[in-house]
Amino acid sequence: MAKTSTKERATPATHEEKLAELKAHMAELQKQENAQSQLISILHKAQSLYGYLPNHVMDEIAQTMGIPTAHIWGVATFYHYFKLTPPGRYEIALCLGTACYVKGAAQILQAVKDELKIDVGGVTEDGVFSLAPARCLGACGLAPVAMIGEKIHGELTPKKVVQILKDYRKQAEKDK
Amino acid sequence: MTATPYRIIVCDGTSCINKGSRKLTAILREQLDKHGLADRTTIGLSGCLGMCDKGPIMVVNPGYTIYGRLTEADIPEIVEEHLVNNRPVARLVIQEDHLYNRFFRVFGDAKFFGKQMRVTLRNCGIIDPENIDDYLSLRGYEALAKAITEMTPDQVVAEIEKSGLRGRGGAGFPTGRKWRLTANEKATPKYVICNADEGDPGAFMDRSAIEGDPHTIVEGMAIGGYAIGAERGVVYIRAEYPLAIKRIEKAIADARAHGLLGKNILGSNFSFDIEIRLGAGAFVCGEETALIHSIEGARGMPRPRPPYPAAVGLFGKPTLINNVETWANVPVVILDGANWFRTVGTETSKGTKVFALAGKVVNTGLIEVPMGTTLREIIYDVGGGIPFGKRFKAVQTGGPSGGCLPEQYLDTPIDYESLTKAGSIMGSGGMIVIDEDSCMVDVARFFLEFTQDESCGKCTPCREGTKRMLEILVRITEGKGKPGDIENLERLGNMIKKSALCGLGQSAPNPVLSTIKNFREEYEEHIRDKKCRAKACKCLVSYEIGDKCIGCGACKRVCPVGAISGSPKTKHTIDQDKCVRCGLCFNTCKFEAIAKV
Ligand SMILES: Cc1cc2nc3c(=O)[nH]c(=O)nc-3n(C[C@H](O)[C@H](O)[C@H](O)COP(=O)(O)O)c2cc1C
Ligand code: SF4
Ligand code: SF4
Ligand code: FES
Ligand code: FES
């Protein structure tokens, strides 16, 4: 059976390696019945390799699967999970679920937007942050909550979130 | 030195992991080695214990001592005091937590029983979800064995029918009837689907159930497959739930390795296997026909029913689709019998219901109560009431498809009919407590913004109608409401309810209509007096600086329009004509000198 994990460790580095892995994944799925139904699984795989869905990769999938690119595009744009542009180095998933809303997520969102000068769905000019809305991260007890990279930050206040962003930015500068 | 064999459970749920539970486990192992206790202590990991706000959580057995809010420094103390000297560390024990008073039949102690009753979550927090032996030791897969070896498929369906179990995904359709319909279909192959798309944006029941006890779902689905004559099952789960995905994947693999899935299960003629398909973040994909399109690799658009999936489902074949929690009830019904199951709950709604209790309530987390428990018992007895001495205003159930109920409905018992009659719905289990600080018009706007965003766009009433409604709501919250707005919302809402294609559109107006019904005066105040009594609508509050001001100047620096003046060390003032009500100054002042009026 196909592996379905969304986050794969040790992602191959070069474009060729990524493509080879994607092709291997597709070849395995092609063997199963109703192979076309695996499109979403393939898009998940592609996004886990590239971080988003580049155009040329969608073309590649279209060719291998024998599906029109337009159809793939239609599917990819329908689902919020798929990203069509590269995300920032740190992806901020700010929870806008009900529990977080009741506990003031709107103020957190405003503070993040003001601090980073980007809107929901945007990427900062330096490519360090991207901001996406999330719906219930399953940590309502800690509301309001944001996930940055893979870490959950809870019980946020506007002040606290700005400080957290500053810390990440410092880290990003150090890594450079 | 004591020779008691200890069994320690460390919560490995999302919330506790994020609070560092894995580091604690590592330290615990070190400490056990150091004290030579490793041989007679076992460490198990568990799914969410439902006490996330008090995490990270660790439970020491025997005794079921629950430790919470642990830090790395606490571990050596617990090992030394509790495990070596047999003196539980009182300071770290969580007291008076109603959320754990409920391990039905496993601990069965009346004192610990509380108002909760764990049936579908019976193993969550008790077993290690990644260890099939743990599940097997608590009668795991016995129900499947019983079904296959002692019952005919028809008897299994009959038992589910008799139990009175109804769908937990929201609509409450009688599960037995759905099974019967699918079983009667002649076409093959048939499919079984577990709906783990969990779309309600304020809920995480299904996620925690899978993270805490994935085998129950696998077992339930296998029983369903046997009952209706399907050999293939699909779990459709949100890609946003990596831990749940990993655990259900492992459960399926382990079940296969034990011959509990695959060809000729337990030596019978029955073969059944399960695969996992990931969702990709579309609320409408929780709707069954949209979900099926999504599994087929297409855009998740719903289609009109009938035909129902029972007749024409996945790849055009008869398909049995149930919610995670519905599946989790199945092994219980088969093992303990419909007669026992019927003893729990109310006349029309049997068994228990899991809720994700959150919002303005002291104990947040996952709870499970018998049907018929009142909202008041859940919020005050289980949830511990409203924090910070605030006033209760409303409880929201059913998420974006549900409604808000005010105080006079608090004694409504939880069952499908009573909640509908009161003007909300049971829904899939989101329960959000709202206090006086929330504005009900804005709550309605919040939900409508969500459904508007998630409308798949296929039918006009949903696509355009929700847009119109949202525009009106936004206007009202901005203080630009007009007489007649409320009536327009009602008219539009009722129109959409009647004419939308799928449940998303048909239920989208509910939060608006229920808040109008129960909190009409708040709408009127916004429109007529341009007032928001909760002081939540930004455009309807103004800011004033009071006597606590020490003149630090911080607010003056952040104000984007230069509305604040004052010399250092004197009280500052806000020019109300310039103020754009962004609230930055309010958030900046460290001296609580700025008030919303
Ligand atoms: C917009 C919409 C969203 C839904 N989301 C879910 C969901 O997240 N989980 C779920 O189990 N059912 C959801 N449903 C209900 C399903 O269509 C279906 O009724 C359910 O999965 C059947 O299982 P049950 O009978 O066990 O409840 C949704 C329905 C609609 C209209
Ligand atoms: S921030 Fe607060 S204390 Fe400082 S000047 Fe403004 S109102 Fe006064
Ligand atoms: S709310 Fe904004 S505009 Fe108004 S006084 Fe404060 S900082 Fe200035
Ligand atoms: S609503 Fe934000 S974590 Fe649940
Ligand atoms: S994740 Fe540990 S108690 Fe919820």
Image (cartoon, coloured by chain):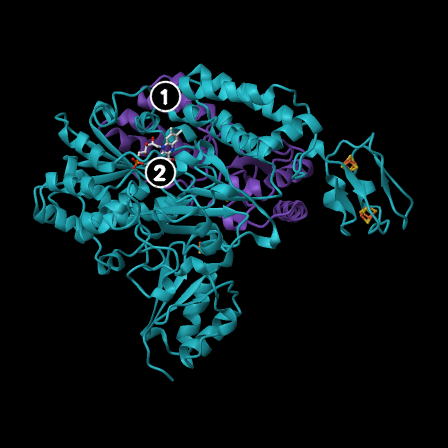
What kind of element bears circle 2?
helix
Judging by colour alone, the chain drawn in purple in this rendered image is: A
Q: Position of residue B352 (x, y in %)?
A: 32, 48
Q: Quadrant of the N terminus of chain B?
A: bottom left
Q: Is residue B356 above or below residue B100?
A: above
Q: Quadrant of the C terminus of chain B?
A: top right
Q: Quadrant of residue A5?
A: top left
The residue identified by callout 2 is B416
What kind of element bears circle 1?
helix
Q: Is residue B30 visible?
A: yes
What hue does chain B carry in this figure?
cyan
Q: Position of residue B467 (x, y in %)?
A: 53, 20
Three-letter amino acid code at disc 2? Answer: Tyr
| Residue in front for this viewpoint, B531 or B581 | B531
Q: Position of residue B95 (x, y in %)?
A: 48, 66
Neighbor class of circle 2 (other Cα within 10 Å; few <14, some 14-19, many 20+) is: many
The answer to whether residue B178 is left or right of residue A122 is left
